[in-house]
Every structure is written in structure tokens, then in C-alpha cells.
Amino acid sequence: MNWGPDRVFDQIARLGATPAEVVLDEVEDENWTVVAAPQSATPPQDVIDGDLVIERALGEGRLVSLRVVGRDVGPHELYGSDGLVRAEVLVLRPARAAAPPTRARGAAESDLVGDQVAVAPPLPTHCFELATYRSMDFTVDSARTEVTAATATSPPVFSFTSTRFRTIAGLDSNFATEFQATATALELLTFTRGRQLLDTGYLRVDPTNAARFQVRVRGLVCHPSRAGYREQLPAGTGKLPIAILVHGNHASLEFTVADSGGPRTSLGIPPIRFTLIPGRSTILHDVPSYRGYRYLQEHLAQMGIVSVSIDTNAANASGSLVALRADLVLEMLDHLKTLDGTTGHAFHNRLDFSRVALVGHSRGGDAVAMAADRNRTRTRNKHGICAVVAIAPTDLTGMLATASRLEMTRDHTASFLCVYGSHDGDVSGRFVAAERSPGWGFTGTGFRHYDRATAPRAMVFIHGATHNRFNTIWIDPAAHRVGTGARRLAEAQADSSVDEAAVDPRKPPSTAFPLPAANRDARVLADTAHRTLAREYVGGWLALWLLRQTAEQPRFVGAQANTLGALVALQWKLGSKRRSVDNFDDSDPTRNVAGGATTRPPFVRERLIELADLAHTPHHDRTLEAELPTGASRIYRSELPTGARDWSRFTTLTFRISKRFPDVSTPTAIAAATFPPTLQITLFDGTNRRSVDQSVIAPLNPLTVRPYHRLRGADNLTKVHLQTWQVPLSQFTGTGGVSLSTIRAVEIGFDAGAGEPIHLDTLSVVRI
Amino acid sequence: MSQVNRVRDPDQPIVTEANFYPGGEGRVHVHVVGRNFVERGIPVEARVGAQVVGRLVLRGDGRGFAGTLERGPREGDRLYVGYADSELQPTDVVVRGGGSGAMLARREDADAEGDENENAEDDEDAEGGTHTNETQ
């Protein structure tokens, strides 16, 4: 087989329908990494000496040239007058060879050399607190407003304001003045939240500029250590990957206020006048949420990953939504860069900023996506983000104007993972009636993050998982002050008051429905299970993407259950090669994303999936929708253009699928519905056709699950969602089968029931 | 005088008092006292009349919040509070007074002995829904 540079180009950036059109594929050759794609905005400084430049003569057959950057061509020669990479140019870089597992030396110590990491045994670990002050903006984003109201067929659009300041005067003017009564009548202590943060060390006056402040950047660091020398990294010269963890919004700071001795003023509330006394605050209580992922950090450290869980209580105490948290992520990374460059520091020259993972929980999940977005546009100190992981995230940008939504693309991160629980009582998918759908709610869920992502990705929807139990501090009563609502919730390990009765671990479990008042819901997972699943899924994802331990991939593609046997619903698009056939996201239903024509029977259409069941669909995404088959034409056909027909280097056909459930009011109703969806898939190579039907497809996807019945108070929050199915391409080959080198079309026959349409999305081929 | 009675969602914050103070540049700071304001992933939201309360910061003990209005509220504007994933619920707090000085908004039944529904969170039969009855 000829695998010359023309073939390499065509596998990654294929010719489109016209000679002048170049279509960027998702295929990644296992030997190469795409540095700059045709017509991309890759900065010239990202193209380095030694990179390989393939120039394809568009429309001129197989003419192609190969050049090497630095030897034959300079980076700036690859760009057009529009500042984009020329359409006929593709820049590649040899991928790192996958590191084979090495045998560890000694009982508990491994020598880290280069990129190789010992798979076993676990490394010893050490954790310590790290803190510094950095000059940075303080951003408060709040005051959400509705720009466009939802209709029966279209979602709402929201906006919120962001205010950035860096001066002391800004702190005073941008936070509301608050008051506290004193023992003396008609005297009030006054303060602002900004001043409280300054008084208590979360902020400090900039030593170089008294008009400005600096922000404390603090975190818990955990790292692999050397046996017998716990404060040192393992012996050797190899660089270690980095993970930054970000907690979400939670009870944080309580203050006491006393007379600062400053000048008094007065305020009149007719007929009374108060004396206002400027107050000085001290911390009464501080909930250390950032310490709540130590169990995960130690697991990562045992694998050889340095992690920092950062304190974002300054954001919690100031009502900030996302932006300040994202800034703190980048500031901590920049601080680690400083330590890495500091002679004599334990981290000197030992941190690998080309292998960074960002892991965020709740609003932290939104924050790490925003941090990756801000990192993407940096021209200096740009870090190599290999993974963005969102645990039970909010999605506060999902219903903003399109340009403001956070979308995890390959420009942002090499991979994206979302972990979310069906029994999340905080980011629950609840929505305001006017929003009409959980897929359209301002606060959203992780399903929307996944829908928008185009980087290699997966989503693990854990049946019975909650919101707070991923953080050990959030469910620790001792971490919360006596008498507060937060402490009461921690005692019940509940995300909200409505859920308390159903999840309290002090109650005996029950599987009865309706749930007896004296019992908890037996389906809800214990906090220990949350930590175990976090280690497996989050730890496994970081092992896959930071350490290249490909043995972790099966758990995300439905080939390996978790050790607890907990039910999970999976969505994923992974593999060393990935090519989209269709995502159904554009406005032209007559063509697929591969550039080929599509033919639909009248009962098949492309539209927003949530329109089939606004009340229970957590997605916001266009999919293929097939209703009850009628008429003579029953097949949906998606053709593949020349250049997209060679599937010989792929192993698996994948797609996301779901069906509408007519009744999700009770577990019995859900169990009684027809499930899974039924369809038949046919590949056509121009000569032969080979079909597989439900009898083959269903056993290949044994981890498919029904919707999880979920009531939260009076709200039915049952989510009817997509799951990924896979069909090995080997099912279509063999005697009388198709040739994978010349696939001309994919044909799908749907067997939807009346009122129960089937939804299909993300039709792709991958190599796994 | 109208009185608002409700069967409260156990997650619904309760407001007992709100005060408004000039904040400079035409802004007005609002200071709300109450309870059951829980810090969660889903943010607390509030509005006074039709105006959204911005830069809302909860008290650490869950007993209220402070925020900012971009312009002064109007006489008769009612305070609504809740979480961003639920309908903001009307409170008993209505703006009174005004002019160049501070304004004060109090519960309409501030002179009453107490609202029995204030104890709803202590009742075992608190339901997951919310409805409002107004009586004259």
C-alpha cells in the first residue's frame, strides 16, 4: 500500500467537494501529531524547526511536496495574507513513541526517566501546602439577564456581566457596603466583602503599588516522592506531568467585624441617624474546600503525577461565577513554572508543562474549561493541556450567545472528560418553567459541555452519584460551623435540603417506590463509592492522557466495567484515529460533514434532540431523528465522497443513540418501555452490502442502561440521554461482505415506535 | 395590607428585611437579612421589581446577602429571591420611602407577632412545591 505524503495529507486534510476545498478530518495518524492544519489560525511560533510540511497541490492530482521547517522553509512562508495557514499546507510533528510499562526498581520506588512511568507498584507520596501572592485581576461575573426568551422550538439566550478590577478603590466601589450592629444603639460597623478579603489575607496590598492589591494563590500540592526522602521527587531527571484541581462554590468564609479605628461618618434614615464605623474583619470560619480531593491527589501522585488543588474561596466569598476561578488556575500554573525554574527547589526542571490536566468540580468544572480557553489564546507561558476534566459541572456559558460558550476543541485540550451523577441534587438539571427544558436552563449540566466538545472525549453518567460526595470536606460536618445550614447538609451528606431525607447515610436503605420516610434511597452511592469511582474514571483518564497508559481506555468505551459494578451510561469518541461521518449540526440536511450527500425518508429529519422531550432531555444538540417508519422509502443513506471512503485503518463504527420514553413518571414505567432502540446498519462498498441488526448490535453494547428515575421534591429530573454504541467494522467484512478500502455509503434503517422517536448523533469511525 | 402565605420549598431562602443605601454613581446597595441561603453550585439570584441584583454576595452564615442595583428601586417594588434553577419567589419585602436618603424595605407584616410559615423548615411536612396565597 502506498503511504506516501499524499496519502498522509489526504488522511488528515482531505480534498473536499471542489478542488479548492480542503476538509480537516479528525484522523490522527498514530505516528504524527498535527501542528498546523490547513486554513487554521495556529500561531507561527507553534511551528518549530524540524516540523514536516506537506504541501498538496489542490486539484492537480497527486502532486505534493515535502519540506522541513528550519531547513527548507520558514514558518512565516506557510501563511497566507489572511494570517491563516495556507489551504494546501499541513504541518506535522512526529508523535512521541508510546512508553511501554517498565518494571519498577525496588519495592516502592521507581526511577522516572524521560516519559516512562512505572505502572506498578504505587509510588510513595507527599503533600504540602503552597501559597503565594500574585498580581492579577479580580473578576466578578454576575447579574444574569435574559436576552432572548425561549419559545416552543428555540432556546433562550442569556448574558451576565463581568467586572475586572485590580485596585483597592475598585474593591471598595464594586462590592456593596454591609452593616453590622454594635452594642451601642445607632452605631453600625461598615465593611465590604472586598475589604474583608483584604483584611484577612485572601488579598494583600501590592508591596510595589499601594493603590493595588495582590491575590493569594494557595493550594494543596501532592507529588510522588522518593522512598525515605518524602519531600523530594523520585530520583532521576524525568519531568512529571501536572494536574490542577479546582473546587466549586460552597460555604466558605465567615467573618467577625470590629472597629478598625478609622474615621466615622453618619447616615440618616429619617427620623434616625446612624454613626457608621469602618470595620476591620477577621476570619471566624474558613471551609477548606481545596483539601477535599486529597484522596484523588494521592492516587495521582502514586501514578507519578504532581497535582495542586487550589483554594478558590476568594471567588466563593465574592459571589464570582467562573472567571476568577479560571484565572486562579492559570496563576497557579504560572507559579509552578516559576518554581520549576528556581534552582534548588524540589521541582527545579522536573515539571512537564506540555502535559497538564485541569480537573474541576461543580463551578470548578466550568472554570477549567474557561482556563483552557484562556490558555489557548496566550502568546507567552502557554501550557500544553492534555486533559480537561469536569466533575458534576455547571454549564453557565451554555446558553450565552454562541461566541461566548465554552467549547472544548482540539485547540483547547487534547481530551475532555465529564463525570456526572444521576442523583446530583445541586446541579440537578432543574430549570425555570420559562426555560422549558433542562437542556435550555441557564445553569445546565455536564451533558451540554459534552455536546459542544469536539476534542477526543468521554462522559460517564454514574447512576446514584451525587454532587457533594466527590469532595470529602463538603460532607465533613466538622469542617462547617455548628448551627449553619451547611453543617446540617454535611451531616446528611446531602446536596440540598430537598434531598436530605432520601440520601442521609444514617438511615437504612430501601428500594421501595415511593420511598418510605424512614429510609434512604438504596440506589444512592456512598461517599466511599464516589471516591473509588473518581480514582477509576478521573485517575484513569489522566493515566490515559498524561501517561499514555492505553490500558485505561477500555473503561471509557464500554469494554470494561468499574470495580464497584456501579451502573454508568457512557458517551465517548476516542481512538488513535477518528473520522466523522456526520454530526447533524449544520443547517444543510442534504450533506454530511464528510462532504457526501444524504438521502432521508420522510419520517427522518435533523433537528434539536430536546424538541422530542423538552422536559427530560439534558442535551442541547442537533441529531438525526427517526419517527415511526412509514411509506415505501425506509432507509437513511449517507454517502461518502472520494477521499473519505478508505476505512481500512479504522476498527469501529460508533454513534450516539437514544429514544424517547413516553412515560418516565415511575421506575416501573421506565422498565416497561421498549428498550434499547432498534436499528439496522448497512455498509455499501459499491458492489456489496453487509448489514448488522439489533441481534448483533445489542450484545456488542452490554453496558447500555435505561434512564435513571429521579425525583427531587416535586420535580421529575429523570434524564433521557444519548449513549454511545459501537459496532466493530469486522462485522461488515468477510465472505460476501464489504471492502473497508472503498466504503461508499452508510445506510440506516430505524425501527422507531409510534411517539417514541429514535435519535442518532456523532456517526463516526474510529480506531480503538 | 396584603399578606403573602406560602408553603415553602425547603431549599427556598427566607427574607425578613432588606435595606437600601446609596452606592455612588447612581447605584444602590441592597442588604438583605434572612436565612437558608445556602452556597451551592447553582447561584442565588434576586431582583427588586424588574431589576436584577448584581454582585450578589452571600453572608457566610447563610443569613442573607448584599448586592448592588444599578439604579434606585421604585416605591412598591417587591424583592424576589431564589436559586438560578428555580423561579424566584416573592418575599414579603416591599420598598417604601425614597428620596435622597436611605430607603428601607420591610416585611409587610412586620408588626405582626410572626408568620407561622417562618417555621416551615422545622415542620416535617414541608413539601417540595411552592404556592402563594394572598389574603387581604
Image (cartoon, grey):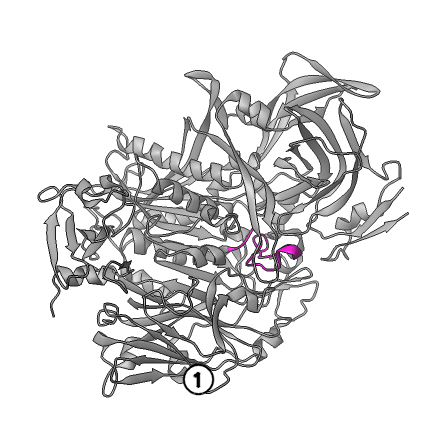
Asked if residue A290 can be seen in this view, the reply is yes
In the visual, does A559 lie left or right of B134?
left
Q: Give the quadrant of the C terminus of chain A.
A: bottom left
Q: Nearest the camera: B40 or A513?
A: B40
Residue that badge 1 annotates: A633
Q: How many marks?
A: 1
In the visual, does A462 lie left or right of A178?
left
Q: Position of residue A577 (x, y in %)?
A: 26, 63
Q: Position of residue A513 (x, y in %)?
A: 66, 71
Q: Position of residue A320 (x, y in %)?
A: 54, 37
Main SS of residues in magenta: loop
**Which quadrant of the figure has residue A101?**
bottom left
Considering the numbered disc 1 on the image, is that residue within a helix, a strand or a loop?
Answer: loop
> Which residue is rendered at x = 59% and y = 43% of the image?
A144
Amino acid at circle 1: Ser
The residue range painted magenta reads: A425-445
> Which residue is rendered at x = 57% and y = 39% of the image?
A142
Q: Position of residue A466 (x, y in %)?
A: 54, 56
Subunit ID for the residue under disc 1? A
Residue A426 counted in the magenta span: yes
